[in-house]
Every structure is written in C-alpha cells, then in structure tokens.
Amino acid sequence: MHNTLFRFRDVSFNYPGGSSVLEDLNLEIGANELSLIRGESGAGKSTFLQLFNRFCDSGNGVILYHGRDIREYGIEKIRKSIIYLPQIPHVIEGSVEDNLRFPFSFTVHRDNTFDASRAEEWLDYFQLQVSLRDEALKLSVGQKQRISLIRAMLLEPEVLLLDEPGSALDEANKKLIEQKIESLLRSSDVTVLMASHSTVSFAHTSYRDFEIKNRTLKELK
Amino acid sequence: MNAEIINMSWLNVAVTTFLVAAAGLCSVLLKLRLEKDLLIGTIRTFLQLILLGYVLKVVFAVNNPLIVFLLFSFMIFFAARIISGRVTEKRVPYFLPVLASMFLSYMIINLFVMAAIVQVDPWYMPVYFIPIGGMIIGNSMNAIAISMNNWFEGLKKDRGRIELFLSLGATPVESSAENFKSSVKSGMIPSINALMSVGIVSIPGMMTGQILAGTDPMIAIKYQIIIMLLLVGSTALSTVFALHIVRRLSFTSNHQLKI
C-alpha cells in the first residue's frame, strides 16, 4: 500500500439548491496510484474529479489531503499541486511556447521558471511533431490534448485529474495518451485519476477501477 | 458684461411646443408612430423640470447641508438604478455595492472640487454642489454602465481561458487581468474623446448656460475646463471602484466563475 494521499469521509455533493449528485463517498487514494472512474455520462464523474481540486466543494463530509482537511489549504496551493484537465482541451492564442509558459506568470508558480529544453523533451515524450514556435490554435484536438498534458506536467503536479481525455480523440490518439499516462506513472510519482465512460485497459500498470452509479461510488475489484 | 438676462414668460415657452407639434406631424405623415412618445416626453419634460425648479429653489433657499446631502444621494440612487437597467447581466448582485462605490467616489471628487478648486464657502453651497455633482454623476454613470457591460461580455467570451487559468492556480484577479483593463478603458474612452473635441464641434452645455446667463466667456471657459478634467477623473475613479467590486462578485470563494 502506498502512502495515503486522499481520504474521503462520508462526502456528498449537491449543487446549491439542486438535487444530490454524489452521496456518502468513502475511499482512500494512495500516492502514485492510477484510478479509473467509470460511469454513464451525467453520472457525476466530472463532479467527482472536481472535488479534488475544489472546483466543487463537498457539502457534507470531509476530504483529507495529506491528512488535512482540503479546505484548510489555499485554493491556489491546491490548484498548483492538483491539476484538472477538462474533456475539451483549451489552448490560448499564441504559440505552443506561450501556451506552456503562461502559468509561470501566476503568483503560485513564482518559484518555478519555464525551461524551454524541458518543454522540448516533453514534446518528444508525447510524440508531438510541433515546434515551440507553432501557432497553438491551428493544432488538432489530439495535439491540443497533449499540449494540455505537457502544460500540466511542466508544473510538476502531485495529482492529475483527467476528465475523459480520450473522448474527443480518434482511437490511435486515445491509445497514445493512455500509453503515455501509464509510463508517466512508472517514471514519476504523479497520482492520476481518470474519468472515462468507455472502457480503458491499461496493459502495463495495475489500476483501481471505480464506477459511479446511482450517485454512489463503488470499487469494482 | 452687463447683458440683462431675458426672463421669458411661460407663454414664450409654450410657443415652442409648436416645434414638437411639427415633429408630431412628421411622425403622423411618415407613420413613425412616435406621436404618443412625443406627447408623453413633452409632458414629462415640463413636469420634471418644473419640479426640479421648485426643488432647487427650496434647496438653494434653505441652504442646509443635510438637505444637500439627501438630494445628492437621491441623484446617485437613481443613477445606479439606470445603470442596473442598462447592464444585461443579472446573476451578479451588484446593485448595492456599485451604489456604494458611486457614492464614495462622487462624494470624494465633489468635496475636493468644492473645497479646493471652486473654494465655495460653505463647502456644501447647493448652487455649486448640486449642478456640478449632477454633471459628475450623469457622465460617470454612462462610463460605469459601459464598462460593466464590457466586463460581463468579456467574461462570457473568455470563459474557457479564464477557467483554464483558474484550474492552473491563477487567482481571480490574475485570470481576468486583461478583461479588467479593457473594461476600465472602455468606460474612460468617451470622456477622453470629449477632451479632444470640446469647443470645436459645439459649445458645451454648461458654458452655453453661463454665457446665456451673461457670464464673461473667459470665466465660463475656466468652469468648463475644470468640469472636463473633473469628468475624466471621476469616470476613472468610479469605474475602477465599481469594477473592483464587480470583479470580486463575479467569482465564487473557491475561485470559480459565477456566470
């Protein structure tokens, strides 16, 4: 068993004034684990992931992160180490480099500096045949998805929350992303939670398999 | 200048309604359907200005700081109502905070002008305080409405980028820095443009009034220059104040966009 990174105690979530989305979640996530969150669209997978970076705040219950209530950390601190990547990758106007560099201008990242050679290495790692000078808006969705991952990895996060990273991609691109995520887990200490409504098979890494159904989360094996 | 002010009789004023009747005739002939609005507008102009005349007569005569303060507050309250009618975004509850920021900035500027520039004694002398205050309010009311609309439209347009920034650890201020700048600018540009064109295209309203009332043009221009510069300052101050508050209200406490 890895060190426990997150512990959920009776966590539930409902939108203000709305019906309940998730109820009585009790689970632990260890460091450097890979967790797959499955469920129909609309089941609450995104909401579940967003509880980790506080895009959503649980109404009841407590989420412990490194043993401390996640609400005791500053929001920016949480977002610095726990990065959420939405289903549809977003790139800003400008070059690939602009897209990888901008987070370093935020106060929370001021101790880190952008390193172009590291960025080049990541482009290679994700098999992106683009240069740092290329215009980001002209890239394909698959390429933008990988740019988003590189942008996150350059910030050296502790946790990656991937919201259906394969949903907008073709089979080949989807496979590539999944493979790269697997090897990322082996080569670094990153912890990954990944939502998906279709099946994903990670061939080389053990992973935890969760399903969200009827507002509750079950571990499948 | 010793020109006597010509005090027109109410009959003279009534004769000018003939011009409105001409406009009404155009409306009928061209089927513009503006007759009703013209009629209501004309009646309202008469009633509102007659009422204003009496209110000012009383306020000037009583010369009491509390009454000046109340009238000034009343004017600001209505300006804030007009702004909230013009700003299309309704999900952010900005009315009271914006009212407060308008109140604060107009009070500061008006007091400064009264005490330091025009140097009236007492500082609240209504003959100066109310008309100059009214010009400040009227102009920066437009600026606030323009900049707030620009802000909310910008947030909607840039939602994807802003949410991306927030998800990577940016604070609300960092994630919307560009939007904030462009909104302040959009509110300030009309008053800066006015600085460029004043006196070339038309004689400004206040100067016209003073000249018609027999003031020497060289005195009238001094007042006008003060007013022009004052308006630039007050639009800048009040839009920055108001947008600061509106920016705060546009994000949730856990750094999410509200709209």
Image (cartoon, rainbow, N blue to C red):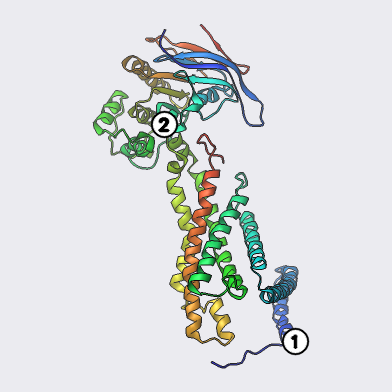
- From the image, tell me which residue sits under label 2: A141
Residue A206 makes an appearance in the image = yes
Give the amino acid at mark 2. Val
Image check: B84 left or right of A98? right
The label shown at residue B11 is 1
Which of these two is toward me, A82 or A120?
Answer: A82
Which of these two is toward me, A55 or A124?
Answer: A55
| Quarter of the image where one finds residue B103 | bottom right
Which of these two is toward me, A218 or B227?
Answer: B227
Image check: A125 left or right of B106? left
* Gap in angstroms between the C-alphas marked 1 and 2: 75 Å
Q: Where in the figure is residue A25, as x and y percent of width and height?
A: 57, 16
Image check: A195 left or right of A128? right
Local SS, label 1: helix
A206 relative to B59, above or below? above
- Which residue is at a point 47% across and 40% down the rendered structure image? B172
Image check: B238 left or right of B169? right
Local SS, label 2: helix
Give the amino acid at mark 1. Leu
Which quarter of the image is occupied by the C terminus of chain B?
Answer: top right
Label 1 crowd (10 A; few <14 / some 14-19 / many >=20) = few
| Quarter of the image where one finds residue A12 | top right
A175 relative to B233, above or below? above
Which residue is farthest left? A117
Which chain hosts label 2? A
Q: Where in the figure is residue A106, as x and y percent of width and height?
A: 38, 38
Number of the front mark, 1 or 2: 1
The label shown at residue A154 is none
Q: Where in the figure is residue B136, as x and y percent of width and height?
A: 55, 66
Residue B145 makes an appearance in the image = no
Which chain hosts label 1? B
Q: How many marks?
A: 2
